[in-house]
Image (cartoon, rainbow, N blue to C red):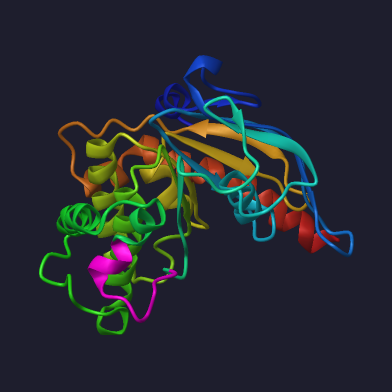
Amino acid sequence: MSSQTASLLVEETNQVNEQSNDIVEVTGIEKVYPGGTVALQGVDLAFPRGKMTTLLGPSGCGKTTLLKIIAGLLDATAGEVRINGKVVSGPGPERAFVFQDFALLPWATVVKNVAFGLEMQGVEKTLREKKAREYIIKVGLAGFEDNYPHELSGGMRQRVGLARALAVNADVLLMDEPFSAVDEQTRRLFQEELLRLLGMENKTVIFVTHSIEEAVYVSDQIVLLSPRPGRINRIVVPGIDRVGKTSDEIRRETGFLDTVEDIWDTLKKYLDDERMI
């Protein structure tokens, strides 16, 4: 590993930010599914306010399980999750979930889909549709307000899902492999658009992906989970400086490439261990 990488990588086994700056705190989380499968065990983790944290690890390590527990969509067997210091007991308005499969209402137009969360909050129709149209423009879907999901491409449907999550003005966005269903070119475009939107909205994001390159590119910190039962292996802070650089320039930098390789070396050990079993 180069000295440049050493200066960019900051690794810890515990929290990497002061507690006062952590919007989400996960303590002692364990998840055992019916039948005895232990998905997560002893997970202690903090998510800094206004930053993007990516959960990364081998298939079956509990990334999505942890995300759904934080969202309040799944109960933990043990442990607790706190948002802004308050214990999570179910879904709440301070969190919004962007699903891998879009989860759009097929009978509703784009504007009605984007406004759906606001409708559930009791926002008056004129106001919620006005706000929905604002976010439709922000995600680049102006002109498609009255289209239905089946009339949109996969990438466009994912933009609708993102606009819906942003429109409710939640503090925390939970994103489960949001770009997995699109091609590589669209995926990279979405990464840029996501970073742009987050720069404007100042949200905390918890992001699940299987792509090491994507995790290094978009994240403020990356949480590496071990194979099932999922535990925290380590936390990597890429420390990418984006000022005055194109996305291609960043991806060609030695520090970026070495960070990708460093994470791959960790995950590869897990794969090698599985082959030996």
Q: Is residue 168 visible?
A: yes
Residue 78 lies in quadrant? top right
Q: Which residues are magenta?
A: 103-114
Closer to the camera, 6 or 221?
221
Residue 51 lies in quadrant? top left
Residue 157 sits above or below residue 239 on the image: below
Determine the residue located farthest toward the bottom in the rendered image. 150
Residue 173 sits above or below residue 114 on the image: above
Whole-percent x and y of residue 234?
Answer: 63, 33
Closer to the camera, 171 or 100?
171
Whole-percent x and y of residue 232?
Answer: 68, 37
Q: Is residue 216 magenta?
A: no
Q: Is residue 275 left or right of residue 86?
A: right
Q: Is residue 56 visible?
A: no
Residue 10 sits above or below residue 95 on the image: above
| Quarter containing the C terminus | bottom right
Q: Residue at x 16, y 72 (%)?
A: 144
Q: Is residue 149 left or right of residue 19?
A: left
Q: Is residue 97 left or right of residue 133?
A: right
Q: Is residue 134 left or right of residue 121?
A: left
Whole-percent x and y of residue 162?
Answer: 33, 57
Q: Residue at x 67, y 54 (%)?
A: 74
Closer to the camera, 91 or 213?
91
